[in-house]
Amino acid sequence: MNTAAEAADKSPIVIAHRGASGYRPEHTFMSYSMAMEQGADFVEPDLVVTKDGVLVARHDIYLSDSTDVAAHPEFADRKRVFEGHDDWYVFDFTLAELRTLKARQPRPKRGTMFDGIEPVPTFDEIVDFAIAARKAGKTAGFYIEMKRPAMFTERGLDPTEKLIAGFKRLADAGVPLYFQCFESDYILKVKGRMPAPLIWLIEGKEDRSNGTWSLEVPLDLMAGKVDGIGPNKALLVDSKGEDSGLVAEAHRLGMQVHVWTVRDDQVPVGIASSRQELKWLFAHGVDGVFADFPDTAIDVRNNVSLVSPERMTDD
Ligand code: G3P
Ligand code: CA
């Protein structure tokens, strides 16, 4: 187990969020490869499940943002409302159908130069890719999230056995691993079978009257049961933009803290730059950051003095 005490003795890890997704369409091999080339400690796949039960990498259960599905007239009648959102859903497509789509950049300001090139990768392909990279001497690990396991299981698409089989292949090959999930029940379901440290993702809830965020359940719900938490970065600051104490509380409970998500092209209101945001996060003791631009996070971690960090001003 990677304990919080062990993590405190090490540099914070940089997790390439959906690959180097600031530069390439998220969840493509070009995005994952670029993250490795930049020196990310971990590459982050998010996993969802197709109609025929295959685990594939997408952040969303819907497809319009990150693929060209809307340009495929043969799938026009698959569009439907689910959970209040009108879209195309991964669980309505077989793998063969999904593979006719191509990945695209979901964020309009990031450019479309690499759109339309790669299909949606399967988890099996990602496992093969990670093992091949390891054999080629690459050191990056894989920090894998299962999206919405309860919803997929309700639909008859329980991902558990395929997920654990993939993790076992990766672990046997010596690939460094984490498993992450928002659903605490699911983490407990796989605990003991998953050959990886377990990270409980926490979104929190916003008080719209003052813009502050707080936990919906206390951290100690999972203390001793997981290796760490992956909190929304908004949970780390109070209404004045100062330290909320969450990192210290997690460390007191023996949990690492890997915070999400830092983006060079989207910084919180009042923050000068992602570099300043990263400097503040590292200075306040996080054990890792999810970053869309991993090179920036690596550079700040390695080269920027953390003395007297102010959150609101640049270096
Ligand atoms: O998994 C960490 C972070 O990625 C959680 O947010 O929604 O981007 O997957 P999301
Ligand atoms: Ca994720």
Image (tube, helix red, strand yellow):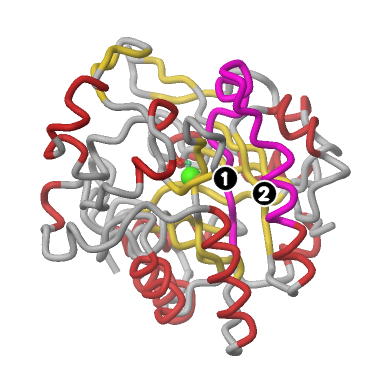
User: Mark 1 and 2 residues: CB-CB less than 8 Å, in contact?
Assistant: yes
Q: Is residue 185 visible?
A: yes
Establish if 67 lies above or below 263.
Answer: above
Residue 257 location in percent, x, y? 63, 49
State whether label 1 is within 8 Å of ligand 2: yes
Who's the residue at 70% across and 28% down the image?
A: 184
Image quarter hosting the N terminus: bottom right
Other-residue count near label 2 (Cα within 10 Å), few / some / many at <14 / 14–19 / ≥20: many
Q: For mark 2, what is the residue?
A: 179
Residue 92 location in percent, x, y? 39, 26
Q: Is residue 148 magenta?
A: yes
Q: Which sits in the foreground, 122 or 242? A: 122
Q: Amino acid at mark 2?
A: Phe
Residue 33 location in percent, x, y? 41, 74
Q: Is residue 207 magenta?
A: no
Residue 175 location in percent, x, y? 68, 71
The stretch in magenta equals: 142-167
Establish if 75 lies above or below 4.
Answer: above
Q: For mark 1, what is the residue?
A: 145
Q: Which sits in the foreground, 71 or 4? A: 71
Image quarter hosting the C terminus: bottom left
Find numbered disc 2 in the image and state the secondary structure of the residue it sits on.
Answer: strand
